[in-house]
Amino acid sequence: MAVLKVTKLGNPILREVSKPVDLNLLSDPDGDLQTFIDDMVDTMHEEGGVGLAAPQVGRSLRILVMECEDSERYPDRESIPLEVIINPEITYFDEEKISGWESCLSLIDFSGYVPRSKRVIVEGYDRNGNPIKIDTDDFSAIVLQHEIDHLNGIVFIDRMPDLTKLSYQEEFQTFWAEKETAPTQP
Ligand code: NI
């Protein structure tokens, strides 16, 4: 187990398009990808996030992890089982949008109000290289869109139509938390 250092906004790796993973390396006994995936999960748990993308821990690879189980931080959120997705692609975006407050381990001080598609279909591979397809909506769809954005060099503030709703966490709690849904912290 290892908790990795989370990259913060300003680190150029967060603005790169991450490289596709060679699926053969997932089962390479001399490779480190399985350990790296375990470390991503450990880091997400340690930092209290519900999702994490590889460039957020310093590797430009198309890997994301997500999970939200019995979160003390997000007691009102639906639970999301642990998912590891390699080379994820969004193959369907619902035209219907939902907006909510998001934060990010790479912009830990901030929350912002972001519109997302209500439902998405994501195709990719599990950590053993088997194809997977996830059809989901609401909270887990938001987390997926947020994390896949990271793989394309995009952070949540880029998606905000109205930057006047960018808030420090303390101000968010003071001025917005009562009025809107609680922030997600992918
Ligand atoms: Ni993030």
Image: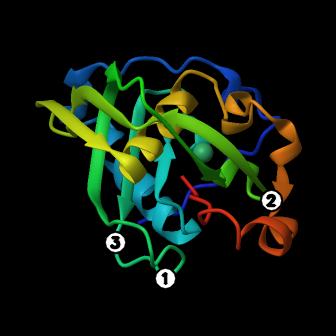
Residue 139, percent across and down?
Answer: 41, 52
Q: Residue at x 72, y 28 (%)?
A: 158
Q: Residue at x 30, y 37 (%)?
A: 85
Above or below, 21 relative to 75: above
Q: Which mark is residue 8?
A: none
Q: CA distance from mark 1 to mark 3?
A: 9 Å
Asked if residue 58 can be seen in this view, the reply is: no
Establish whether ligand 1 lies closer than 8 Å to the Cβ of label 3.
no
Q: Which mark is first along the chain, 3 or 2?
A: 3
**Picture quarter containing residue 175?**
bottom right
Q: Which residue is mark 2?
A: 109
| Residue type pointed to by label 1 | Glu
* Front position in the image: 148 or 120: 120
Q: Amino acid at mark 2?
A: Asp
| Disc 3 element | loop
Callout 2: SS = loop
Q: In the rendered structure, find residue 69 and report the number of the disc placed on it.
A: 3
Q: Which mark is residue 72?
A: 1
> Left or right: 122 with respect to 166?
left
Q: Position of residue 33 (x, y in %)?
A: 34, 39
- Residue 74 vs residue 122: left or right? right
Secondary structure beneath dot 1 equals loop
Q: Residues within 10 Å of mark 3 (few under 14, many from 20)?
A: some
Q: Are marks 2 and 3 in contact (CB under 8 Å)?
A: no
